[in-house]
Image: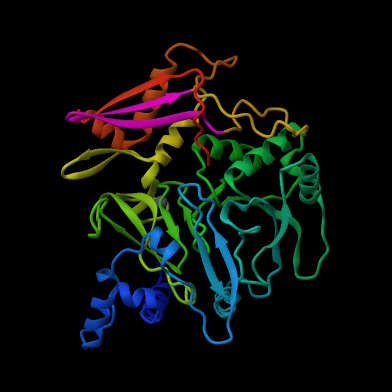
Amino acid sequence: MNDSVRAYQLSALRATLRIASENPFYKRKWKDQIASSARGEGGVELDRLPILTKEELKTELRPMVGEGDKIASIIHTTGSTGPVTYRYRSQGELDRIAEFGKSVVRNIRAGNSRPLAYMLYGPYHGQNLPGPGPIGEGVAPYYFAGAIWDDIFIRQGVEQLRREFTLPGLESRVTQVHGAVRLLRIFTQCLIDMQVPVGETKVEAVVSFAGYMPSEVRRFLGRYWNCNPIETFSFSETFGGATKCPHCNGLQFMPHLLPQVVELDADNPAHSGIGRLLITELYPFGTTQPLIKYFNGDLVRIVDEQCPTCGTIGSLVHVGRDNESCFVESPQGRRLALGSMDLREAAYTPEVKRTVEFPHLKLLKDRESHLGAPVLAAHTKCEGAKTRLTVSFLPNLGLGISQSNLADRLRNRLLEVSPELRATVGEGLVDLDVQPEVGLEKILWK
Ligand SMILES: [Zn+2]
């Protein structure tokens, strides 16, 4: 991280904490910390503050606006891991963010034409076009709204990717395709099935912003588009998020998002192993509804070695969601046995049957072999000192899939993907049971 980013974060954090300490919710929640800072014992310190839970954001942290200001943006989560959560921003906040965005990108792209991007529509993050929102308006890509819901949109997309534009201040060809992982997969398979050579497009970047991109999908997209897909980690409650290093999978957050990691069951900072990811959104973001040490349910692995590609020591790798992952429970606390992202990574394998995607799309020919979500479920059961972790899957009985040892192959893959599973099975804490189950209907979406 360079010095100017660090300087911005320090001053923005001070502003953020000052604004939050005026909010009635935080006044109540931080009363001890605010009292001690008023006694001249230094300002409110981030490390000493309690965690903000999803429940508090949903029910207690009311939006606050200045006089004459009004709510201008409401973003809601997909509710993929619980009830839908809403987050609010006022017009004043949006204006300050736009100013901030302009000052940041003015230096980066001054005088350049804006790139054209094709955005596959899907409200996976509670808004039509995620894009950068008001950040960098005027310099960020211009987003064409695309979709995959019908053949007509697929044809429209192909037409736009082939078209040459002559528009002042904009580049002449679409060079980026953005979308949720699921939509990118379907759009790409349509192009393959329509026999559109990638050389007829000028696409240089494929960017995913919702959902996990398993290596199988990464390879599939990379092969067609002839580029390394950019996977971003984001959640609906914040603008932007983190990109993933293609080598270590480490999360590289945008400067206005400050990550911290605390232990699984205690609020102490975690320095190694598995922990809970907390995010603080820095000024000028979050003035309406400050997000301080927010736990969205994401678990990360802290990687000790330095990554040769991004150079990070202590990369944070997203391993799953708290309420979807499997744990060994003991009186000493929980220990992660299998993160839900690692389960997804392992589940995208030919042995597991997929859902049939978009059967009404006539342009989509191969919709069964790899496009859908795996039909698979995992659960744990405590059996005395041991935990039984059962992974059930709908076997893929398709042609070309060897039917011998389907379960063993999936078992090996799970152990290969998840270091936590290898460790807990190796230490005799977990009995791993992998079994085909004809008729299984549990689907691993996203
Ligand atoms: Zn890296």
Furthest toward the front, the residue is 59
Residue 379, quarter of picture: top left
Query: Which residues lie in the magenta part?
Result: 373-393
Residue ID at (46%, 47%): 81
Magenta segment: does it hold 377? yes
Residue 164, quarter of picture: bottom right
Q: Residue at x 51, y 33 (%)?
A: 443
Q: Is residue 314 visible?
A: no
85 shown above or below 151: below
Tell me: residue 377, above or below residue 104: above
User: Residue 406 placed where, x, y %?
Assistant: 44, 17
Q: Main secondary structure of the magenta part?
A: strand
Q: Left or right of 12: which side holds 238?
A: right
Count of numbered labels shown in the rendering: 0
As drawn, is 445 to the left or to the right of 271?
right
Q: In the displayed structure, would residue 199 be above or below residue 404?
A: below
Quadrant housing the N terminus: bottom left
Tell whether position 382 is magenta: yes
Q: Is residue 29 visible?
A: yes
47 vs 239, left or right, is left
Query: x%, y% of residue 287?
Result: 47, 76
Q: Position of residue 101 (x, y in %)?
A: 57, 74
| 43 relative to 67 in the view: left or right | left
Tell me which colouring the rendered structure shows: rainbow
Q: Position of residue 159 (x, y in %)?
A: 81, 47
Query: What residue do we see at 16% from left, 42% from top?
Result: 331
Position above or below: 12 against 191 = below
